[in-house]
Amino acid sequence: MTVRTRFAPSPTGFMHIGNLRTGLYAYLFAKKNNGTFILRIEDTDQERKVEGAVDMIYRTLETAGITYDEGPDKDAGYGPYVQTERMGIYKEYAEKLVELGGAYYCFCTKERLETLVDENGNHTYDKHCRNLSEEEIKKHLDNGDPYVIRQKVPENVVSSYEDMVFGEVSVESKDIEDGVLLKSDGLPTYNFANVVDDHLMGISHVIRGTEYLSSTPKYNLIYDAFGWERPNYMHLMPIMKDAQRKLSKRYGDANFEDFISKGYLPEAIINYIALLGWCPKDNREKLSMEELIESFDIDGLSHSPSIFDETKMRWLNGEYLKAMSPDEFYAKAEPWIEKGIDGKDYDKKEIALLLQTRIDILSDIPEKIAFLNNFKEYDTNMFIHQKMKVDFEVAKKAIDIATDALKDFDDWTEDGIKEQIKACAESAGMKSGQVMFTMRVALTGEPVTPGGAIEMAVVLGKEETLRRLAFSKELIK
């Protein structure tokens, strides 16, 4: 079998993490099996279509490193790949299905349909038009009466299929409504369009969420009525916000581009969401796209929902940052460093070297280095360190030692400054650790910094280092 999978997002807003994971799994499965991965835009729900959402789909896939083999801009003879460009196809096949006995014209008015309610208060259809005579149908059509085309679900049958994850799924036909396939405006419903498109595009494996697990038997009845071969199905458990709630696009949960704007790396996001519902045999957590393709298999798919844990994704993103070369990290970090120093004349490469192992996401950077750009009065109680036996008097003496050591010192490197401070501290009868602790607070005014006193001095430069030492001594009462 030639494997052909598809990702069929609707342009109704941002790219939800759950939706992106479905596309990722379809991509991984196709690539693992030397198959073809197809992008199809399902835009028949025109009322919910969002301006710019189609471009967002292309942008997201490109950023995520998910490359489709066929799509709206890569027609391999199965297009168009945008549903609203396939309207004539749906009408043709809906009418053909009527001829084959798998569907029928329904001329019921909206007012009549609104009166049809079951014992639970749910709207249902009573199959009123299912058995209209050819004469009655012709009369309605000749009169130009509005109509929809409904699926003619066989009576007293059980529709079953074998899901690749969940095994056999069966639904009795009495529990399947004669749903609308083609609406009165000529637009197809999802139930019909996805079957027609998947067949005509030669989709061999349909990969989607478990919300379609119980409705797939209904789709299979359409395949059977046409005499088409059914595809294979792989249904995926949902990603949850917590133990009770699914991640929801409606509430703005887990937007891929939001994570990118927060400083997450695309490869880290893709790596993390791949593990939300699937686990490789060797239980590795950090995998490149190539490793994901090589490792992906159905046996690793979960039968339980996964909870989205941004803390875990932050950690994984930090592992990607740490694994970069200094030049790679600097290329990613430079815009965020620039934002943090706000045009000040600091060595951004020196700052990047300090930060690479000390951040998890790039947007941590401006806050981590805010002291470089915003040095003002601070809480001097930070100088008190009982374990190191530092109090205000010791702190003032330490600042004097550091100032005397550096004011006429020119070897402004980490090694040079470190040796100079150690020598001067010992000469003054103070431990070098006391001086360096005090010096770090005096230079930053922060309890936590991305480096120690020596590293801070190198980044600040000699003039600013001496200015801050003098400023901090005046602060100590």
Image: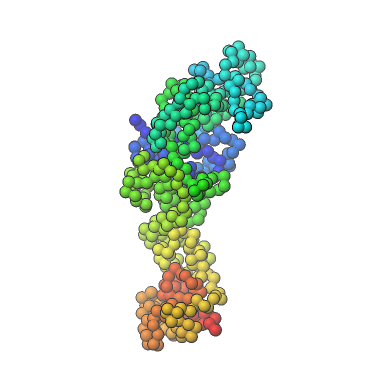
Residue lying at the far left of the rendered structure = 282
Indicate whether 191 appears above or below 104.
below
From the viewer's side, name the closer residue of 174 and 368.
Answer: 174
From the viewer's side, name the closer residue of 146 and 382.
Answer: 382
Q: How many circles with numbers are drawn on the protein? A: 0
Where residue 76 appears, as percent x and y from the top left, is 42, 32
x 36%, y 79%: residue: 419
Residue lying at the far front of the rendered structure = 119
Indicate whether 62 appears above or below 125.
below
x 46%, y 84%: residue: 394
Indicate whether 115 appears above or below 356.
above
Where residue 379 appears, as percent x and y from the top left, is 54, 76
Where residue 299 appears, as percent x and y from the top left, is 35, 40
Where residue 472 appears, as percent x and y from the top left, is 52, 80
From where the camera sits, is residue 410 visible? Answer: no
x 42%, y 57%: residue: 315
